[in-house]
Each structure stands twice: as C-alpha cells, then as structure tokens.
C-alpha cells in the first residue's frame, strides 16, 4: 500500500482518503479488485466520484459464493447499464507505477494494472481499490505459537469454537471452522451463542450447560438478500448443489429484457424447495426462504412452477404482504434481526 493511489475499502476514513486522492490527482479511471459484496459496493462508490470504474475479479463470475453463471450474466447486464466495466478471470500481476516500476518498494503513483493473462494489455488506471476477501487478523495467535493456524490464515476451531489452546475460543471472521471462514454477521452471532455456553461451563457458572448438553456450531445459513448497484440479489438454502448431490431438480426463469434471473432448486421429486438464486427481482425472497428453511413439503396444490415467476411478471393480483406474528421471523438477513 506504499504506492500512492492504492487503497483498501473498509472504513469511512478509507473512503475519505479515496475521495481526497481522486480530487487532488484528477483521477479519471480506477480499478476495484474483487467482485464480491464489498467489491461491488466499492465499485459503486468509485463511480459516484465521477470516475470510470473497472471491476476486476479473479473468478469466472461475480459473487461466486452467492450466484451462478446465469445470475452473473443478469447482474453484469445491470452493472454495465450503469457504465461500470467488468473484467472476470483477471489475473492481476502488478501495480504499475507512473515510472513503469512494478516492484513493491516503489513509491511511484499507480498508473496501470498488469495481468498475467495471455494477450491482456495493461489497464490504465490512476487509482486501485483492493476489496478481495477476508483476511483474518490472527497476528496474536501467530505470535503466541501455541494456537493452530490454517494454511491460508484463521484460527482453527472445533464445533465448540475451541482452539488448540486450553481455555481459548475464537469466533467471527478470525475463526476457521472446517476450513471455512464466515464473512457475515449472522454466523458470528451463532458462534457467540455456542462459545458463551462453553465458556460458562468452563467457568462453572450457575445455570451453565452440562458437558453432554453443550451446543455445537455445525455451520450457518448463508442466505442473504441485498440491493447491489440498485439490483436485487438474493440467495438462500442450497443454492449451488455439489456435483455428488443426487436429490436435485431445478427450474430457471431467465428474462434478459427485464434483467431478471431466478433459479429455484428442489428435491428430485419436486416436493421440497431446497434453495434458490434471485437476481433482478427478489420481492418474494422472504416467502421462498421460509419455505426452504422449513424443510417441509410444498403446500398441497402448490407446484414448483407456481413459485418460479418473479412477482413483477405475475398477472394475478399481487400477494398481500403480511407481518408475521412469529417472534423468530427474520426481518433482516444481514444482521439476523427477528
């Protein structure tokens, strides 16, 4: 980050620094490295500065944890309508300075991105924003030398969120559970509940759970609904079944004219909704998410095809939105607010 013009995008101070640099240096073009949730937000922030915004993604598609190729195509269509540029399968190799240097010690302001892709030209940019994934802040654990660390970072924990050190627990973005780090707040809350119960038992607090009754963290629901660059994007349940999952059937709605893509995944018999991907119109996300998470069979008379069309395409009167009286009903997927 010593090269002028290279920023991370996490705090309001980062944004203020970007704004000041863009204004002082008459930045015309910028690259955002990372096509995930935060990267797309950063790309919109760059565009709002009046700067041409390039989204640079290593994977073949944007938001590869949440959507598939069809969802990517619909999302990219919306993004490019706004004037942003998308570059997937991009292998960023160097930040090139104004003086042509590519070494990490140079303090020449950034002037281009260089890629290792064959036949790719340098991309001229005067600012780079790095927003490419979660980096666990595990420095303290590394320094102590007695806590197991994952190969790519993160503190290794078991189902009780225990680390390899006696009496030490880890939760949130620093915890590596079954070789996976969760970047959403809702799984962090689930981890906190488990860790709290385990710590209370360790301390012998009154009312603490017994050893056999301790809760376990076995994973988390990563369902989420967001509005990215003005476009609805949602995923829930089993949205990308594994290759060895044989209990799968799916229906797809793809309307490139309206920029709407929907894929609903059912069991092979078509009697249960298992998950889905919604891009462009996620107006019925709450309903579909509830059906999938219940693991119940579809209501009598309801067919998979009836669930597929987006609310904006249905010719019948729109369903009346009712407020659930269930205190556990989710009203915010980002913070798991009920």
Image (cartoon, grey):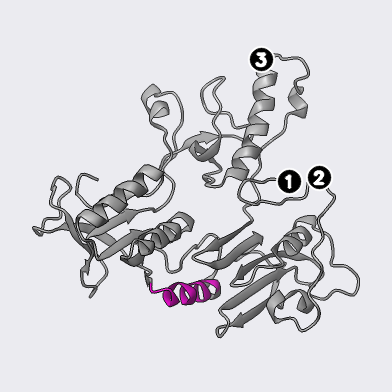
- Asked whether residue 27 is in view, the answer is yes
**Residue named by callout 2:** 327
Secondary structure, mark 2, is: loop
Q: Residue at x 50, y 40 (%)?
A: 173
Q: Where residue 252 appears, x then y in whole percent?
A: 65, 78
Secondary structure, mark 1, is: loop
Q: Is residue 137 left or right of residue 222?
A: left
Q: Residue at x 14, y 47 (%)?
A: 107
**Residue named by callout 1:** 338
Q: Residue at x 16, y 53 (%)?
A: 109
Disc 3 to disc 2, how far (Cα)? 31 Å
Asked if disc 1 and disc 2 are in contact, CB closer than 8 Å, the reply is yes
Q: Where residue 188 appears, x then y in whole percent?
A: 59, 39
Q: Earlier in the sequence, mark 3 or mark 1?
A: 3
Q: Is residue 165 left or right of residue 329?
A: left
Q: Where residue 213 appears, x then y in whole percent?
A: 77, 28
Asked if disc 3 and disc 1 are in contact, CB closer than 8 Å, the reply is no
What residue span does the magenta drawing correspond to? 71-83
**Residue named by callout 3:** 203
In the current view of this chain or complex, which residue is farthest to the left?
99
- Foreground of the two, 82 or 278: 82
Disc 1 to disc 2, how far (Cα)? 6 Å
Q: Is residue 82 magenta?
A: yes
Give the class, few, some or many, for how many residues have Cα within 10 Å of label 3's Cα (few <14, many ≥20): few
Instruction: State which quadrant residue 138 falls in.
Output: top left
Q: Earlier in the sequence, mark 1 or mark 2?
A: 2
Q: Earlier in the sequence, mark 3 or mark 2?
A: 3
- Foreground of the two, 32 or 105: 32
Q: Is residue 220 left or right of residue 330?
A: left
């Amino acid at each position: 980050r010593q090269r002028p013009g290279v920023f991370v995008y996490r705090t309001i101070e980062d944004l203020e620094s970007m704004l000041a640099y863009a204004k002082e240096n008459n930045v015309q073009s910028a690259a955002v490295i990372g096509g995930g949730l935060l990267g797309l937000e950063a790309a919109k922030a760059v565009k709002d500065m009046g700067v041409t915004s390039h989204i640079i993604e290593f994977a073949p598609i944007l938001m590869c944890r949440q959507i598939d190729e069809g969802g990517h195509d619909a999302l990219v269509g919306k993004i490019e309508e706004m004037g942003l540029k998308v570059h997937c399968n991009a292998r960023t190799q160097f930040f090139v300075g104004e003086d042509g240097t590519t070494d990490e010690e140079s303090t020449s302001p950034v002037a281009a991105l260089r890629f290792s892709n064959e036949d790719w030209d340098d991309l001229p940019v005067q600012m780079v924003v790095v927003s490419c994934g979660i980096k666990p802040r595990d420095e303290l654990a590394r320094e102590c030398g007695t806590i197991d660390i994952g190969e790519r970072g993160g503190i290794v924990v078991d189902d009780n969120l225990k680390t390899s050190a006696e009496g030490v627990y880890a939760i949130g973005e620093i915890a590596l559970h079954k070789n996976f780090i969760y970047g959403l707040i809702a799984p962090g809350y689930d981890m906190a509940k488990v860790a709290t119960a385990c710590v209370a038992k360790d301390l012998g607090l009154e009312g603490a759970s017994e050893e056999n009754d301790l809760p376990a963290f076995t994973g988390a629901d990563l369902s989420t609904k967001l509005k990215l660059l003005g476009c609805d994007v949602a995923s829930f349940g089993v949205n990308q079944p594994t290759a060895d999952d044989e209990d799968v059937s799916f229906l797809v709605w793809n309307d490139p004219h309206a920029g709407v893509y929907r894929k609903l995944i059912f069991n092979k018999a078509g009697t249960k909704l298992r998950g889905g991907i919604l891009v462009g119109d996620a107006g019925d996300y709450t309903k579909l998410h509830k059906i999938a998470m219940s693991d119940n069979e579809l209501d009598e008379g309801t067919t998979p095809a009836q669930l597929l069309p987006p609310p904006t395409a249905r010719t019948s009167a729109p369903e009346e939105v009712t407020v659930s009286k269930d205190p556990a009903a989710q009203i915010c997927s980002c913070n798991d607010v009920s």
